[in-house]
Amino acid sequence: MIDSRNDFASRTRAFLTNNIVTIIFVIFVVAGYLSSPGISVSGLLSEVISRFFRNGLLVLALIIPVMAGLGLNFGIVVGALAAVLAIIPVRYFGIGGMGGLLLCFAIALPIALLFGWLTGKLYNKTRGQEMIAGIIVGFFAEGLFLIFVLFIIGGVIPVAAGHPMIIPRSVDGVAVPGVGIRAAFDMGAHATHPVAMRDPYHVPGLSSAMDFLWRIDFTVALFVVALGVIAFLVIRRVMAKKNKAIKKSTKLVFGLKCGFWGLIALLALHGMLMPDGMIFWFPGAGFGFQAPASPIAGTGMIPVVTGLVILVFSLLTTYFTKTKLGQDCRSVGQSQHIANASGINVDRTRIIATMISTVLGAWGMIIFLQNMGTVSTYTAHRQIGMFSVAALLVGGATAAKAGVKNAVLGLLLFHAMFVVSPGVGRLIFGNELVAEATRNFMTYGVIGLSLGLHVWKTRKAAERELSLDAFDPPPPTNGNGGASNGEGGDSSIKEMLNAPSNATADTVE
Amino acid sequence: MEETAKSGTDIKGLIKSLPPAPFIIGGFWVLVLIVAAILNMPWVWLISDSLQRAAIWGMLVLAMVPSIQSGTGPNFALPVGLCGGMLAMVTAIQLGFTGMGLLVMAAGMAAILGIIMGYLYGVLMNAVKGSEMAIATYTGFSITAVFFIIWLAVPFDNPFLGWFIGEGLRNTIALGPMAANQVLDNFLMFEVIGLTIRTGTILVFAVFCTLVWLFFRSKTGIAISAVGANPMFARAAGLNVDRSRIIANIISTSLAAVGVVVYAQSFGFLQLYDFPMWMAFPAVAAVLVGGATAQRAKVIHVVIGVILFQGLLTTVPPVFTEILAGADMTDAARMVIQNAIILYALTKIRGGGK
């Protein structure tokens, strides 16, 4: 009955509409790269990779709330504020190095749990409007945070006179304890920083405390990752032969995947062994050739520990879906009503999902700030929610579906956009100053576009379902399905459409 | 026995039916004014300033009424209208208008641009029923970024618009050289017991309030309210839901577009670039302070809300600065109050809670 050509066309169209945001970004990045002659492959990679490790955990933090049907957790800003609150005492008392950083993680944990619990409570009270509530709660928390760092610290909590983090104040030329944290404070130089190396009494700071623990060259890391992926593919295939439960891919797909990662491994090996190219000459044969310089050599060093942390949390997020709690989250995400009927505590599950997200957001922010090296006290958290959400959406996630793959792809594409947008500004407007505006537009636009498309598609699907329902006799138990307090457009539409039938039922009674 | 129980619930119901926000915020404002009087501060001047700010914010807050009534929720995409109004004003300046003519011309063009942009925005809001507010917020941010590029790219050559060197329009355009600053403010301005009443601006606000009030008594206006109250019944009654929502958003956007012209003349400067980005939130908070909810709003809510909210924002900084000996807590306090009000309203949305 289905014409195969038609089927192909509709599948192509479905693919395009489902991935439109990702496709726009790929085109943008390619066009931007081609129009920026100043940027080399390794330059672009270097920028993108360093931002990848800086922002990785922040984007991962958004996945679990999406699973639980909360949409994109813009309230992750609250987690970022918890991180700054944790860093302030650690920096104030000058505790540096990895120990200081671990202390930051430890202090941030209870604060983020508390904030996440409160945010989760709020989300339960604003059911169906979690995203706007998340945006507003970020602003609200910022106000409280400003009061704390500007007036409570120094005003209520005593501070030392002349401490470099505190806004200085003096009476008759004598330094007295000030009130409020300065607009920016640094994370303290790392032990290998030139300033620190010259100072024999240097106390290691928090700056790059995690990144500098162990660094390897990008090509080496890429080689290891590529080999790891191939090993994973082979092991899974062997396991699939024994265990029928694991889905087995076709030989072609398996071959293509292995081939792709094999090529990546070769590329990395080329970068490792002959970064500047090499001339091969065989005198006996009177024949030779020149290997070209590696395009990816010179990308820079990779922070291994940060990478491992991101990897561990990626695996944990994937593993989480298989736990009881993860399954509960999914049921709640699909239908709060049905989840409730099957004995899941919906409110509690949603609060836990928000708490996990807030904690990961706080830890992600600590990793972000140790990489940046300075903290803009009043504004560091501001863009965190927006940029993380945009990155996840660029990777093909929606308000209802997101995974680690989306996070990884999105991080790479979104930050590549940041690097190439001056080029696009020049290409379209002949003005590189437009870069900042272009970036902002792409960020806000991508959030608006993918949220809008998602709601629109959900509504269309609901309408189609309804028009099909119209031909069937109504089910005997109406069930008041719409009473599950709307998650997005879908059920609120159903709710509206169910309203008259409920009303008639009431009148009959 | 039954009677007493009933009257008990009646009183409870009455108290519950009263919106708490105007009383809390109003009480707080009065308290701050009393403190100002005790501290011997010029509180008459404070009230006068509050009234002026209320008048210039009035139309932007009024823009919330149609969108709330139509069920789209508070117009978080206020920047859409603002950008239209700003473009109209810049164009009118470029065309060489001055004084009252500039304002009339700008307002006229702003209304036209508001209609076009409001229509497109209304179509968008119809496509995303159910998540309007989050998407409206990002529509507002996106349009601000788009106009950021437009301000850099428009080829206007009026010396008062551009920088002395380089391309693009200025950040802040003074309306003084065009004799368009405080034109409405100074119209029939008078003073009572030290209270400066800027009649023109207040009059314009009052006229638009009346127009919106009258509109919601017309057939189309009642249809919009019905659509917002219960879209399903409205459809069953033969009303075109989507069309009503579009009309409401056109009016809302146009009000914002004309409103920014009034705002700029009273302020004396037209700000471009980042200016619209954060304008929606104080306007939303103001109408909620007046007693509106995210689903029902009246013109009276706008009048009460804008006076209380802008009054509070005008009065708190100087008084707090006096008390706290120089520490400026304005921004932080404004963020807390404004967003607490919006959050409270979000928890009251139908289908919210459990």
Image (tube, rainbow, N blue to C red):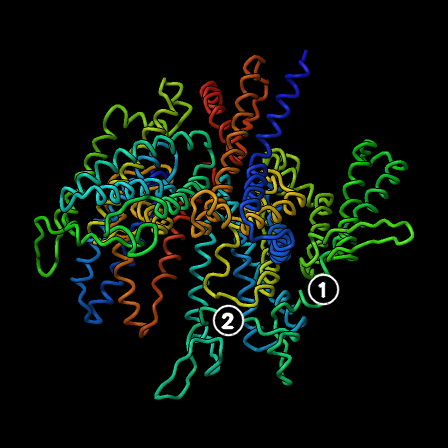
Label 2 belongs to which residue?
A185
Which quarter of the picture shows residue A106?
Answer: bottom right
In the picture, the quarter occupied by the N terminus of chain A is top right
The image quadrant that residue B67 belongs to is: top left
Looking at the image, residue A157 sits to the left or right of residue A414; the answer is left
Q: Secondary structure at mark 1?
A: strand
Tag 1 residue: A215
Looking at the image, is A27 positioned above or below residue A351?
above
| Helix, strand or loop status at disc 2 | strand
Foreground: B290 or A194? A194
Give the residue at x 70% y 50%.
Answer: A314
Coordinates of residue A264 in the picture (x, y in percent): 76, 47
Question: Which comes sooner in the sequence, label 2 or label 1?
Answer: 2
- Residue A144 placed where, x, y %? 44, 61
Mark 2 surroundings: few (<14), some (14-19) or many (≥20) residues within 10 A? some
Quadrant of res B10: top left
Neighbor class of circle 1 (other Cα within 10 Å; few <14, some 14-19, many 20+) is: some
**Looking at the image, can residue A356 be seen?**
no
Left or right? Give the position of A221 relative to A52. right
